[in-house]
Amino acid sequence: MQPRFVIPSRMTVVRDVYKLFSDEKKKLQAEIKKQNQRVCLTTDCWTSLQNINYMCLTAHYIDVEWNLCKKVLNFCQISSHKGELVGKVIESCLHDWGIDRVLTITVDNASSNDTMIAFLKRKLNSWKGSVLGGEFMHSRCCAHIINLIVSEGLKDLHDSISAIRNAVRFIRSSPARLSKFKACAEREKIEFNGLLVLDVPTRWNSTYLMLESAIKFQNAFERYEDEDDKYLSYFGEEEGGKKKKGPPTYTDWEIAAVFVKFLKGFYNTTLKFSATLNITSNAYFHELCEMQSQLTYLSNHKGSLLSKMAASMEKK
C-alpha cells in the first residue's frame, strides 16, 4: 500500500457511500420523471437466518435508446409477509421514487401476494397510473411456478435423493474424506475437478445440480464404501428419530440418472425465465406448452418410472 495514503475513518466512508447512493438515486428519479416512464415491477420477500423479514423491489423499463433497464429501487426490512402490509411498504417506496405509472407487478405464486396486488391495484387506479384498470397488472413468476411443479415431483423420489444427499454430505464434511474420495475417483479413472455439489433441499435446481454431479462419481462412491468403515457407520446413525437413508444403492443411482435427464428441460427453462439482460415474456408460453406436452406424454405411459411423478406434477 502507498505509505502516504491516509485510510479514511469509518464515518467518512459511511458519509461517502451515502452521498454516492443519494446522487445515484436522484439521477434515476430524474431519468424516470423526464421520460415519463411506465415501469414493470418485481418484488420478493424472505426471512433471514436471524428471523428478520426483508423485501426487495425492482423496476424494469425501456429507456429512450431502447435499452432494457433493471434497477433495484429498495431493499428494506419489513415487519411481516402479510399481503396488505407489503402493499403499503411498496406504496411508500413508489411515492418516494415518484413512480405512479406501473404496467405489471410480477410476484411469486403465493396467496398473500393476491392481497398485496389487490391493494396496489386500488392505489394505482386512484393515481390513474394503471392500464385498463389494472386488469393485467398481476403477473405470476413462471420460474416460481416451475419450482412448485418440480418440488411436487421430488416427493415421489425422496428416499433415493436423500440417500445420495447423505453420501455427498459425508464426503464433503472434511478435507480428509474429500481427499480419500478423490483417490477413489482416480482409481476408477474419473476426472475429479472438486465439483461435488451439496444441495439446498428447498431449492430443486440445486438438487438437480447435486444429482448431476454425483452421478458422474457413482463408481467412486461404491469404491469409497470399501475404503472407509466410517462411511457405513454414518448411515447407521439416526436423524430425526429415523435411520439415515443410504448408502445409495444401484437402484438409487438408476433413478437419479433418469430423474436428471428428465429435469434437464425444466432446469434449462428456468434459466431462460431467469434471464436479466433480455426480455422473457415472449418465450414463456412456448416453454410452458413444451413442459405440459412432456408431462402429459409421461403420465400416460403407465408403469414407467416417471409416470406417477409426471401425473402429480401435471396436477400441480
Image (cartoon, rainbow, N blue to C red):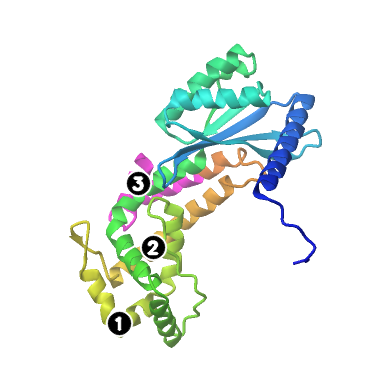
Nearer mark to the viewer, of 2 and 1: 1
Three-letter amino acid code at the position of disc 1: Asp
User: Between residues 3 and 151, which one lies in front from this camera angle?
Assistant: 3
Image coordinates for residue 126, horizontal then vertical, percent: 59, 12
Image coordinates for residue 316, horizontal then vertical, percent: 36, 40
Which class describes the residues within 10 Å of circle 3: few (<14), some (14-19), or many (20+)?
some
Looking at the rendered structure, which numbered label has been put on residue 204?
A: none
Three-letter amino acid code at the position of disc 3: Glu
| Residue 142 to residue 136: above or below | below
Q: Which circle's residue, 3 or 2, is located before the other in the chain?
A: 3
- In magenta segment, residue 268: no
Q: Spatial distance from mark 2 to mark 1, Cα to Cα?
A: 29 Å
Which class describes the residues within 10 Å of circle 2: few (<14), some (14-19), or many (20+)?
few
Dot 3 lies on which element?
A: helix
Q: Magenta part mainly helix, strand or loop?
A: helix
Looking at the rendered structure, which numbered label has been put on residue 228?
A: 1
Q: Residue at x 77, y 28 (%)?
A: 30
Split into 4 quadrants, where in the image is the N terminus?
A: bottom right
Name the residue that disc number 3 marks.
Answer: 152
Which class describes the residues within 10 Å of circle 1: few (<14), some (14-19), or many (20+)?
few
Q: Residue at x 44, y 26 (%)?
A: 83
Three-letter amino acid code at the position of disc 2: Val
Q: Is residue 172 visible?
A: yes
